[in-house]
Image: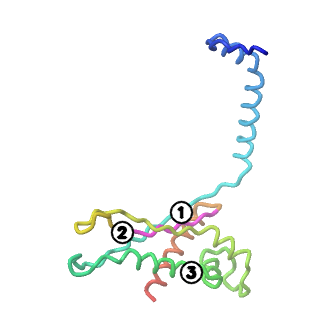
């Protein structure tokens, strides 16, 4: 029968010896990862992100009179607005407004509309509030955050502004 010995507990000298034996492997790996990260940092184009917040106001109706179902309704309305806003025609109009394509261009380019669709973010901001009647807190929508990504800060800001204007116009209709 073979006897296996239980190794003695490792001491600090054992760890230091292992580190000294493998220090060049550790240094080379760290240097390679740092060089790749540095190269990618300089190589990748900058992306600027601009956001606009749209406040969602709750109606001034007492909770005693009406049960709270606004959050679901508001979220549904925001989803409908997203669907209407992100159509190819609306994205093409946005591209004209932010001067990505010439104003007199008539033919809709799928590449332009897809890149705009990827650059747009629309997020709902919810807040939990304690309810007097229920043990479960209410989830209230308080704002919609509209974001736009671009390769220049001016274009990002212009895109977020025009996108917010389009959302407000669509909501008015």
Q: Residue furthest front?
A: 1
Question: Which of the two marks, 1 or 3, is nearer to us in this view?
Answer: 3
Q: Along the polypeptide, which appears first: circle 1 or circle 3?
A: 1
> Which quadrant does the N terminus fall into?
top right
Q: Residue furthest top?
A: 13
Question: Which of the two marks, 3 or 2, is nearer to us in this view?
Answer: 2
Q: Tell me, what colour scheme is on the image?
A: rainbow
Residue at 24 percent of width and 79 percent of height = 61
Residue at which label 2 appears: 140
Cα–Cα gap, marks 1 and 3: 21 Å
Q: Position of residue 87 (x, y in %)?
A: 62, 82
The tag on residue 122 is none
Residue at 26 percent of width and 66 percent of height = 131
SS class, disc 3? helix
Q: Position of residue 24 (x, y in %)?
A: 77, 22
Q: Along the polypeptide, which appears first: circle 3 or circle 2?
A: 3
Q: Nearer the viewer, residue 75 or 53?
A: 75
Q: Along the polypeptide, which appears first: circle 2 or circle 1?
A: 1
Magenta segment range?
A: 141-150
- Whether the magenta-drawn stretch holds residue 152 is answered as no
Q: Quadrant of residue 116?
A: bottom right
Question: Which of the two marks, 2 or 1, is nearer to us in this view?
Answer: 2
Q: Position of residue 77 (x, y in %)?
A: 45, 80
Q: Quadrant of residue 47?
A: bottom right
Residue at which label 3 appears: 83
Give the left or right position of residue 109, taking residue 59 as reference.
right
Cα–Cα gap, marks 3 and 2: 22 Å
Q: Is residue 18 above or below residue 67?
A: above
Q: Position of residue 44 (x, y in %)?
A: 71, 52
Give the left or right position of residue 52, taking residue 38 as reference.
left
Q: Residues within 10 Å of mark 2 (few under 14, many from 20)?
A: many
Residue at which label 1 appears: 50
């Amino acid at each position: 029968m073979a006897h296996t010995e239980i190794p003695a507990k490792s001491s600090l000298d054992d760890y230091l010896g292992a580190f000294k034996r493998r220090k060049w492997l550790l240094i080379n790996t760290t240097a390679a990862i740092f060089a790749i990260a540095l190269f990618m940092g300089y190589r990748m184009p900058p992306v600027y992100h601009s956001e606009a917040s749209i406040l969602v106001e709750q109606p001034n109706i007492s909770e005693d009179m009406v049960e709270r179902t606004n959050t679901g309704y508001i979220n549904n309305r925001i989803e409908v607005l997203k669907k209407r806003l992100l159509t190819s025609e609306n994205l093409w109009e946005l591209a004209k407004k932010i001067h990505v394509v010439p104003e007199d261009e008539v033919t809709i380019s799928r590449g332009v509309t897809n890149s705009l669709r990827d650059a747009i973010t629309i997020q709902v901001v919810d807040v939990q509030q304690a309810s007097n009647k229920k043990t479960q807190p209410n989830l209230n929508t308080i704002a919609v955050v509209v974001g736009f990504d671009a390769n220049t800060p001016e274009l990002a800001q212009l895109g977020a502004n025009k996108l917010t204007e389009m959302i407000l116009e669509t909501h008015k209709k």
